[in-house]
Amino acid sequence: MSIRLRLVLSYIAMLIVPLVLSVLAVILIGIATLGSLKSVFQVNYSEGSPFKRIIEQEAELSVYIKAASEANPDQFLDAFFLSQLEERLHQINMGLIIRKDQAITHMSSYIKPDQVPDISQLPPYGAYGASATKFKHNQGPLWISRQQDFIFSDQSKGSAFIFLDGSPFQKYLHQFSTSVIVAFIVILVLTNGALTYLVSRSIIRPLRALKRAAEEIKDGNLDFEVIPQTDDEIGQLSRAFEDMRRRLKQSVELQLQYEENRKELISNISHDLKTPVTAIKGYVEGIMDGVTNSPEKLDRYVRTIYNKTTDMDRLIDELFLFSKLDLGKVPFQFERLDLVDYIRDCAQELAFDMEKKGVTFLFSELPSGPLPVTADREKLKRVLLNVIGNAEKYCDKANCTIRLTVREMDGKAVVCIEDNGQGISEEELPHIFDRFYRADPSRNTSTGGSGLGLAIAKQIMEEHKGQISAASTLGQGTTVCLTLPLHTTEKGGESE
């Protein structure tokens, strides 16, 4: 779930949940308040609604008062009659006020004698529409619900007022409103607090993890893994951060490897250049000191100096070529060619040189049809010369044999150069394509070469989108295979 959707849902929940809980709270508080309010009325609640029972009793008493006023109005001046009437009214929390002309002759005990309201607050005689009139006394509001007018025997005007004491209602209404407000505030605070905590925790926790990871990376610890905890935007950010950490770690490791290779390169170059330079210096000093006291000796010294200089020149050329290949600054002239014809031409050119050196050079296993590839003729020939030259140098047997084969395998062209030389150990085999690597620990340039031949071959094959690999058995020989993708022609055009 996205953060945006989560926030929208949380906002909706912050509106709906408090509203629903508030309604439930109002209902519960209302039920509790109603239960407390029932104690004010002394009626039978077993049958029907309690409010209906109260209204019915109030109506019955009104009818009774009307009938009594018509039958004998003077009994409203009788204390015993009024006490019985008050007892019945008290059960429904109501009281009675009797007015004769402009004087109040009776008032329920709800109103104390020193708290009698002004008579002007009572409705006038004959004001039948003034029911439910409200007036206040010192203890709370009173609501006049009924007014029954009649004439006393002495022809004075009388009125009987039935009123409801509003003090309990005011008390319970105050309690109800206070409870509702407190409940609403508590529900609002708890609901919003809980929802805010849950939503913020789902956002803050992964952010804290990202912060910790950033601090670890800042301190140089690139092994601290960031595990995405959600699938939202922060989870996507965590995955991007983790991908950045991995790439940064790879970059740092690659940089360290480059630095190590640079140091090794400088060391190897220094060693490989110092050896012939030292030899040249020794022979030149010998000539200067007069050691070469014969033309033959002088000629041998000069030839040695020339050979050492040639080795240095070849090493510098190969180093320069490798550096340009490594930087991608060597131009390649790719063209489509038949690998079978190309290898056949190269093999015929090499066979004569191999024969003069006493090496048996065999060219076999030619496929019946052409093998079209896209390659740079000169660069691919450089690869063949480097591999074959390497096989020749390490062939320590009298009947040295080098076999070259071409075949198609899994939609690719494969050229293999096999020799019966001294072979390479399993420990050294993975490193033979590294620059300046020589199986000969003495780093003798007379047999080991510059150490860049196979590294250059690997770089050239990679530029051809191909591969170079080797298999060897110590004491039996080595096989180096060059793999190139075939150039295929499809309808509508060509594709490599």
Image (cartoon, rainbow, N blue to C red):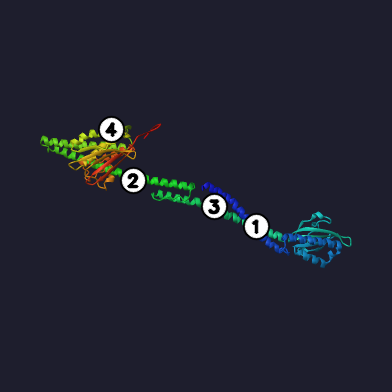
Q: Is residue 496 above or below residue 149?
A: above
- Of the residues under marks 3 and 4, which one precedes in the sequence? 3
**384 and 319: which one is in front?**
384
CA separation, marks 3 and 4? 77 Å
Q: Which residue is mark 2?
A: 256
Q: Which residue is mark 3?
A: 196
- Residue type at mark 3 is Thr
Disc 1 and disc 3 in contact, CB within 8 angstroms: no
Q: Which residue is mark 4?
A: 341
CA separation, marks 2 and 1? 73 Å
Percent x, y of residue 496: 36, 35
Q: Which residue is mark 1?
A: 27
| Front label number (4 vs 2) | 4
Taking the view exactly as shown, the residue that stands out farthest to the right is: 154
Label 3: which secondary element = helix
- Residue type at mark 2 is Leu
Choose top left, top right, bottom left or bottom right for residue 30.
bottom right
Disc 3 and disc 2 in contact, CB within 8 angstroms: no
Percent x, y of residue 33: 67, 60
Q: Is residue 400 above or below residue 76?
A: above
The reply, left or right, for residue 483 in relation to residue 108 is: left
Disc 4 and disc 2 in contact, CB within 8 angstroms: no
- Residue type at mark 4 is Asp
Residue at (60%, 55%) from the top-left corner?
187
